[in-house]
Each structure stands twice: as structure tokens, then as C-alpha cells.
């Protein structure tokens, strides 16, 4: 009996862990403790992270030593400091909302910093999944899959609970 209770507890914990993150907005601190600086690989920093509409990027740096310019893809690629920025942030602790789906590009507009790696591209996923209107297969994203996985997990827990209760 005790072992069955333990099994149930484990299943509940697993289901909770598998819950999609879409329900809560996250703040991502760019570069973690290293902050926003040259000679850093921000592409590597993005690996394993899922950015979603409603999340924020937080850029930390010494005010006046760097900035954050949101630019288009070609200006990002060219490290174009003269680009007409979509947005520019310069407070030193910039909370940048990811308020739209798709790719967003950021560069530092100071000296040669962008060419030295102070550039970041993120791909922003849609915020929520409505089971009533599944997206087309071409736009199925990871949070959609996470949501399905979660629903399967919930069903598995329900079935297991029923089996234990009716035993
Ligand atoms: C993200 O940062 C903002 C500004 O500092 C804060 O108001 C908000 O509560 C934070 N959100 C989370 C989920 O930590
Ligand atoms: C950044 O890291 C990724 C993954 O480790 C690597 O593929 C890429 O070449 C690196 N970029 C630079 C500019 O070093
Ligand atoms: C940089 O941006 C400016 C302003 O939009 C543009 O005139 C120029 O051609 C761009 N340079 C490069 C290398 O893309
Ligand atoms: Cu800089």
C-alpha cells in the first residue's frame, strides 16, 4: 500500500515538472552573471532556453559602456551600428519585453563590441496554446509539444489513480 502511495506521489511530481512553462512569464538574464559584454557567446547562452511572448530579456551592464539596439536581421549580421534601431535601451539594467512572435536581434552599438560577439538573436515562440484551434503543422512549436506531453501525463496520472483507488 505504501509503495502504491509513493508511486502516485512520484507520478504527480513528474506531471507537475512536465507542466508547460507558458502559464508564467519568465525573465531571462542575458549572459547570467557575466551580463551584456563583448567576448561572450550569446548564441551558446540561448541553447536549451525557450523564449515565449510575454517573457523579458534583462540586459545588465555598466551604463554608458554599452547599449542594446534592437535591429533587423541584416543589421545584426553586419553588426551595423548605424542601423536605424527598432528600439534602443541604455539604462544598464534594461528589461526588454518579448512582445511579439518570431526572431529578434540585438547588438551593442559601442566600438567593435558587436563584432566581438556582443550580439544576441532569440526566436520567440507564441505564448499560449488553444486546444480548440490547433496550429497548422508548419507552426507546431516546442511549447505545443510540451502542452501535449503534459496532457498525456495528466491522463496517465488519472488512469493510475483510478487503478489504485479501485484496486
Ligand atoms: C521580471 O522582472 C520585472 C522587472 O524587474 C519584475 O517586475 C517581474 O516581477 C519579474 N518577473 C518574474 C517572473 O520574475
Ligand atoms: C558559439 O557557440 C556555438 C555553440 O557552442 C558555436 O557553434 C559557435 O561557433 C560559437 N560562436 C562563436 C562566434 O564562437
Ligand atoms: C546600416 O544601416 C544604415 C541605416 O539604415 C544603412 O544606410 C546602411 O546601408 C547599413 N549598412 C550595412 C552595412 O548594412
Ligand atoms: Cu558593448
Image (cartoon, rainbow, N blue to C red):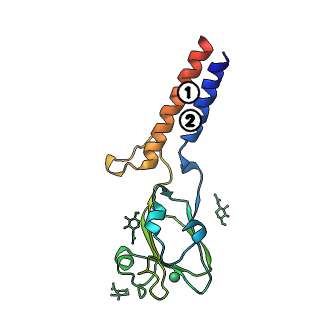
Q: Nearer the viewer, residue 55 or 108?
A: 108
Q: Are marks 2 and 1 in contact (CB under 8 Å)?
A: yes
Q: Is residue 144 above or below residue 40?
A: above
Q: Residue 15: which numbered mark, if any?
A: 2
Q: Position of residue 77 (x, y in %)?
A: 35, 76
Residue that lies at the very extreme toward the left in this rendered image: 138
**Image quadrant for the C terminus?**
top right
Q: Is residue 71 above or below residue 148?
A: below
Residue for point 47% across, 83% down: 113
Residue hosting label 1: 157
Q: Helix, strand, or loop for circle 2?
A: helix
**Image quadrant for the N terminus?**
top right
Label 2 to label 1: alpha-carbon separation: 8 Å
Residue that lies at the very extreme toward the right in this rendered image: 2
Q: Earlier in the sequence, mark 2 or mark 1?
A: 2
Query: In this orientation, does residue 30 appear?
Result: no
Amino acid at each position: 500500500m505504501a509503495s502504491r502511495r509513493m508511486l502516485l506521489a512520484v507520478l504527480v511530481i513528474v506531471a507537475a515538472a512536465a507542466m508547460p512553462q507558458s502559464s508564467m512569464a519568465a525573465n531571462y538574464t542575458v549572459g547570467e552573471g557575466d551580463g551584456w559584454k563583448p567576448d561572450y557567446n550569446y548564441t551558446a547562452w540561448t541553447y536549451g532556453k525557450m523564449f515565449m511572448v510575454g517573457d523579458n530579456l534583462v540586459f545588465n551592464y555598466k551604463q554608458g559602456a554599452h547599449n542594446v539596439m534592437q535591429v533587423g536581421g541584416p543589421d545584426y549580421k553586419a553588426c551595423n551600428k548605424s542601423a536605424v534601431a527598432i528600439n534602443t535601451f541604455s539604462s544598464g539594467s534594461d528589461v526588454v519585453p518579448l512582445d511579439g512572435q518570431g526572431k529578434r536581434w540585438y547588438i551593442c552599438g559601442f566600438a567593435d563590441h558587436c563584432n566581438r560577439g556582443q550580439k544576441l538573436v532569440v526566436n520567440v515562440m507564441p505564448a499560449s496554446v488553444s486546444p480548440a484551434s490547433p496550429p497548422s503543422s508548419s507552426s507546431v512549436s516546442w511549447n505545443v509539444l510540451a502542452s501535449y506531453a503534459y496532457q498525456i501525463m495528466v491522463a496517465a496520472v488519472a488512469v493510475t489513480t483510478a487503478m489504485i483507488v479501485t484496486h
